[in-house]
Image: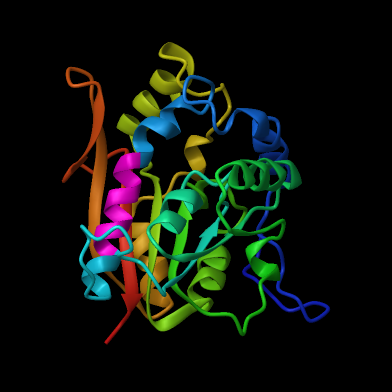
Amino acid sequence: MALQHETSGAPASTVDPAEIAKFSKLSAEWWDPTGKMAPLHRINPLRISFIRDAACRKFDRNAKSLSCLSGLRMLDIGCGAGLLCEPFTRLGAQVIGIDPSATNIAAAKLHADKSHLAIDYRNVMVEEIDPRERFDIVLAMEVIEHVTDVGAFLSRCAALMKPTGIMVVATLNRNWKSFALAIVGAEYVMRWLPRGTHQWDKFVTPAELEQHLNGMKLVVTEQSGMVFNPLADRWKLSPDMDVNYMVVAETAP
């Protein structure tokens, strides 16, 4: 697919309908910590702490405060049923969660209502967000490996950042180790994820991601791998970015 272009006044979509259909089928299981989304529930605390700490460093907040993100606007792109939206709302952020799957958004709204949380959920693509809207924190967590055009997608995400904001991206590296662990191991051997959840050729290397971001006048200020420790039965941050990794980017000085 070519880079985004203007047609009838709206940017071209980077959404892959097949990917939306795939995750829509899982809508009822997003909040089940023992179901098909169990791996995401297990890694979620690590994602939350990484994003929270990066935001607190950027905006000079106390990460130990229960309202450390108060007053900050956050956009969670591809939010699913809200596994990140809810904890960040509890930390005080004004969260907008968007997802092109109507069933995901319905599940997100239902769970937020049960949790008595006011979250602005929208069944839209990132290209449909009003370009005049700006956010302190833009999240693209485990999304770019599912879009049709990584550069076009990231460009739209970057355009929604405030000049003083940050973008956090989580994705999967592309190498033989990630093929062995994230595809063969996670989907076929351990069966942590449904078969076909990921396509290895759509994984993005850290160098490729940084090149895209640099082209948008963004610089990577933090990065970390995420590795699973089978002995401790938990995920942890690591310098090893061979498989799962996260980066923080902000406007170049």
Highlighted magenta segment, given as a residue range? 45-54
> Image point 30% across, 66% down: which residue?
55
Q: Is residue 106 magenta?
A: no
Question: Is 48 or 115 nearer to us in this picture?
Answer: 115
Q: Position of residue 154 (x, y in %)?
A: 50, 66
Q: Going by the image, does 23 lie left or right of 52? A: right
> Image point 57% across, 52% down: which residue?
78
Colour mode of the rendering: rainbow
> Image point 42% across, 12% down: which residue?
189
The quadrant of the image that shows the C terminus is bottom left
Question: Is 97 or 148 nearer to us in this picture?
Answer: 97
The quadrant of the image that shows the N terminus is bottom right
Work out whether 120 lies above or below 31: below
Q: Position of residue 62 (x, y in %)?
A: 20, 66
Q: Going by the image, does 57 lie left or right of 102? A: left
Q: Is residue 53 magenta?
A: yes
Question: Is 108 or 44 nearer to us in this picture?
Answer: 108
Q: How many marks?
A: 0
Q: Give residue 129's quadrant in the image.
A: bottom right
Q: Position of residue 102 (x, y in %)?
A: 75, 47
> Image point 60% across, 28% down: which residue?
29
Which residue of the protein is positioned furthest toward the right in this rendering? 8
Q: Position of residue 8 (x, y in %)?
A: 83, 78
Which residue of the protein is positioned furthest toward the front in this rendering? 116
Work out whether 221 lies above or below 228: below
Give the overall secondary structure of the magenta segment. Answer: helix
